[in-house]
């Protein structure tokens, strides 16, 4: 198997393919595996040493890693088939900016891409403004303010973050926004960037003009450096010209099998679905591995689930309410800087914070239980984020619960108007089973 990209998705695919008995060769343009976890994600978001340890463990299972190896655009992917690989999995991520965020940014030397901020250690001195939506903009702002505090006089540098959405509408974590403000980031929410003021505009002060309320209100934020966090798409220089793309620029795949428009080629992760959580990236890699195994061997792998209910230790609604509403503790400004400006400042405090946040996690040993007071109003059906609750067809409106997709988030118990749903303790077992579905296909067409 050929895997293009040694990020989370590619490594997860290699892990499961190795367990299923396949040989994997991973190609990546970087020096070390891990993708964004080892090259760009700030250490205060995810410990880089953990990512390196997991990457090494997966490669030790037998996968061959070709570092500094880029599969070129054009016939590169199909060339892998001709070289003897039975299947190709594309997991190249989405590191390329889709387009400019502001007018004039292309030729202005003070404009920096947010991804370049995360992948380099160069501090930016003076007035810095970050524009763009999403975690990329927030991470860039936090890294910049930490580097300014570490390398230069904190009073000489200010970092502003401009968000087009108001706080109540942003998809960013309130806890992470609070952490950024606590660290010194100046937040401008509900302001939409309009244009970059440069010497060509005869502006007395270089800066960025922002607007709100449909353009009726404007202001200028002076800046010496502008960091732009544009929406990301897969790098175009590694995608086959015959590979189908979506209107947004991502690799088009079958949502169930992750099969692309090219025979024998699968894709997943950020290059197919955009940047999501690490859990989503791992799940894509696992799903692709199972689908590739089924396509090549004719044997499908699936999870067989069984459960045994325990009639004690019911979870009350108060616990669910706390799990849903408890927010992260606001971090205090650190008293001293570490050698790594992007790392956590106090290892002991970091471990304590991890333990504190782990206590907020949903309990994976519980499942929702519906008692006889249920009126089958359908509220749980409308609020369940994974569709575990459904109402039977044909007008009988009988409530059905599917344990398989349930993530035990507790939203159903929180929102049930009758209090008929409780999170009760359960014990279950999951096993991998295989079943033959078709004749194996050893080589791609």
Image (cartoon, rainbow, N blue to C red):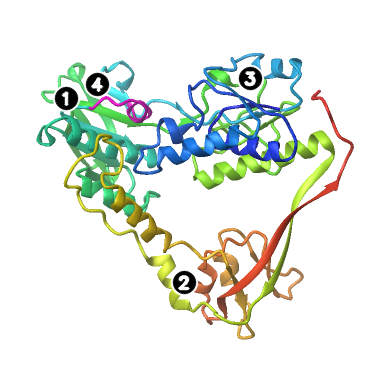
Element on which disc 4 rests: loop
Q: Earlier in the sequence, mark 3 or mark 4?
A: 4
Spatial separation of the CA atoms under disc 2 and disc 4: 48 Å
Spatial separation of the CA atoms under disc 2 and disc 3: 48 Å
Spatial separation of the CA atoms under disc 1 and disc 4: 10 Å
Q: Quadrant of the C terminus?
A: top right
Q: Dot 3 corresponds to which residue?
A: 240
| Farthest right residue in view | 439
How crowded pointer 2 is (Cα within 10 Å; few <14, some 14-19, many 20+) is rated as many
Mark 1 vs 4: CB contact within 8 A: yes
Q: Earlier in the sequence, mark 1 or mark 4?
A: 4
Spatial separation of the CA atoms under disc 3 and disc 1: 41 Å
Spatial separation of the CA atoms under disc 3 and disc 4: 34 Å
Element on which disc 2 rests: helix
Q: Earlier in the sequence, mark 2 or mark 3?
A: 3
Q: Dot 4 corresponds to which residue?
A: 110
Mark 2 vs 3: CB contact within 8 A: no
């Amino acid at each position: 198997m050929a895997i293009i990209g040694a990020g989370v998705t590619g490594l997860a695919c290699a892990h499961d393919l190795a367990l299923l008995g396949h040989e994997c060769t991973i190609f990546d343009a970087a020096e070390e595996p891990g993708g964004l976890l080892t090259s760009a994600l700030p250490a205060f978001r995810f410990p880089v040493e953990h990512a390196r340890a997991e990457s090494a463990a997966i490669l030790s299972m037998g996968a061959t890693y070709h570092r500094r190896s880029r599969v070129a655009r054009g016939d590169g992917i199909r060339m892998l088939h001709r070289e003897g690989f039975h299947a190709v999995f594309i997991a190249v991520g989405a590191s390329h900016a889709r387009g400019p965020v502001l007018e004039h940014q292309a030729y202005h030397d003070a404009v920096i891409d947010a991804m370049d901020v995360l992948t380099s250690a160069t501090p930016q001195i003076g007035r810095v403004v970050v524009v763009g939506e999403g975690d990329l903009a927030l991470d860039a702002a936090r890294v910049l303010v930490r580097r300014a505090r570490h390398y230069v006089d904190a009073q000489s540098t200010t970092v502003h973050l401009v968000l087009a959405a108001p706080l109540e509408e942003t998809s960013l974590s309130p806890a992470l926004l609070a952490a950024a403000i606590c660290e010194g980031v100046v937040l401008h929410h509900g302001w939409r960037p309009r244009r970059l003021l440069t010497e060509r505009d005869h502006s007395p002060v270089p800066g960025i003009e922002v607007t709100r309320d449909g353009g009726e209100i404007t202001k200028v934020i002076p800046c010496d450096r502008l960091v732009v966090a544009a929406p990301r798409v897969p790098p175009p220089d590694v995608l086959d010209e015959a590979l189908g793309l979506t209107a947004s620029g991502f690799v088009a795949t079958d949502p169930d099998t992750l099969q692309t428009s090219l025979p024998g080629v699968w894709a997943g992760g950020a290059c197919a679905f955009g940047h999501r959580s690490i859990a989503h990236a791992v799940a894509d890699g696992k799903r692709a591995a199972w689908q590739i195994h089924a396509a090549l061997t004719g044997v499908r792998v699936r999870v067989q689930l069984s459960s045994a209910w325990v009639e004690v230790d019911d979870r009350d609604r108060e616990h669910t309410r706390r799990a849903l509403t408890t927010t992260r503790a606001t971090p205090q400004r650190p008293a001293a800087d570490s050698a790594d400006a992007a790392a956590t400042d106090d290892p002991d405090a970091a471990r304590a914070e991890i333990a504190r946040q782990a206590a907020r996690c949903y309990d994976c040993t519980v499942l929702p239980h519906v008692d006889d007071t249920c009126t089958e109003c359908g509220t749980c059906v409308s609020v369940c984020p994974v569709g575990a609750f459904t109402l039977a067809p044909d007008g009988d409106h009988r409530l059905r619960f599917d344990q398989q997709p349930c993530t035990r988030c507790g939203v159903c118990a929180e929102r049930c108007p009758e209090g008929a749903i409780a999170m009760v303790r359960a014990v279950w077992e999951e096993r991998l089973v295989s079943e033959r579905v078709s004749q194996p296909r050893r080589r791609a067409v």
